Image: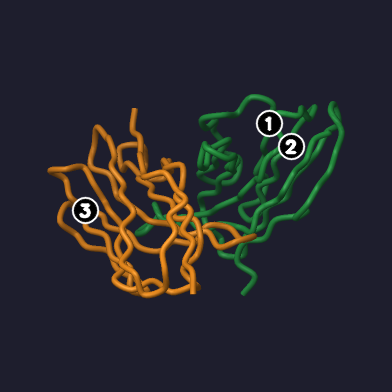
Amino acid sequence: DAGITQSPRYKITETGRQVTLMCHQTWSHSYMFWYRQDLGHGLRLIYYSAAADITDKGEVPDGYVVSRSKTENFPLTLESATRSQTSVYFCASSPPRAGKETQYFGPGTRLLVL
Amino acid sequence: GDSVTQMEGPVTLSEEAFLTINCTYTATGYPSLFWYVQYPGEGLQLLLKATKADDKGSNKGFEATYRKETTSFHLEKGSVQVSDSAVYFCALSDLNTGGFKTIFGAGTRLFVKA
């Protein structure tokens, strides 16, 4: 009954370091998403994936890399972290057929880049 | 492109007051509309949704009606409780993009005082 989990929940890193945020879902949902949440901007889509090995850019993909080798995992990597990437990151997933537009969110990862 | 505009917060109400949070949208196609709620320290949860014009979504005493003529999806609740304090996000999902690119509003924070 775990649903969708994210790790770590909190992360402090330094400018220039590589950081990977993990997302894992137990529902076998086809679609998965990464958002960042910043004050005044709501949620902005970084990357999404329609299935294993299929990923595509969202609204704000620069500085991020994703992969999806298994349906249940969708890690997000910041290749060289910048202060502007300080944010709260949410992973989400949706089922493949009816109701696919409804998204189920993880608890979020708070990232601080110093 | 598609967009969602919702009223700025914070909204502060006393317990048992009537709640309205305004939401309007622009879309080229026929989107599904959603309200998500985010409690402190948590991810977003789907509150209600409507998939076509004149549909009414409802859940936990909250209601919203899909008004195509006014491109609106206002959230209402007749009597709020302290436990309703949260951030509320209006969102749309356009089936023309496969239904899985969801556009979120900036969010409206609600405080309910006892």
Of mark 1 and mark 2, the one earlier in the sequence is 1
Amino acid type of the residue tagged 2 in the rendering:
Thr
Q: Colour of chain A?
A: green
Tag shown at residue B66: 3
Looking at the picture, tell me which residue is in the foreground, B111 or A64: B111
Colour mode of the rendering: by chain
Q: Quadrant of the N terminus of chain B?
A: top left
Amino acid carrying mark 1 in the image: Tyr
The Cα–Cα distance between marks 3 and 1, rounded to whole angstroms, is 36 Å
Picture coordinates of residue A81 (x, y %)?
A: 78, 30
Task: Spot the residue most to the left.
Answer: B69
Q: Are the numbered discs 3 and 2 placed on the same chain, yes or no? A: no
Q: Kindly identify which numbered label has been placed on residue B112.
A: none
Q: Residues within 10 Å of mark 3 (few under 14, many from 20)?
A: many
Residue assigned mark 2: A77
Choose mark 3 or mark 2, whichever is in front.
Answer: 3
The residue shown at (80%, 38%) is A19
| Circle 2 chain | A
Above or below: residue A52 compared with residue A4? above
Q: Residue at x 36, y 75 (%)?
A: B16
Q: Colour of chain B?
A: orange
* Residue located 49% across and 56% down the image: B87
- Quote the CA–CA distance across marks 1 and 2: 6 Å
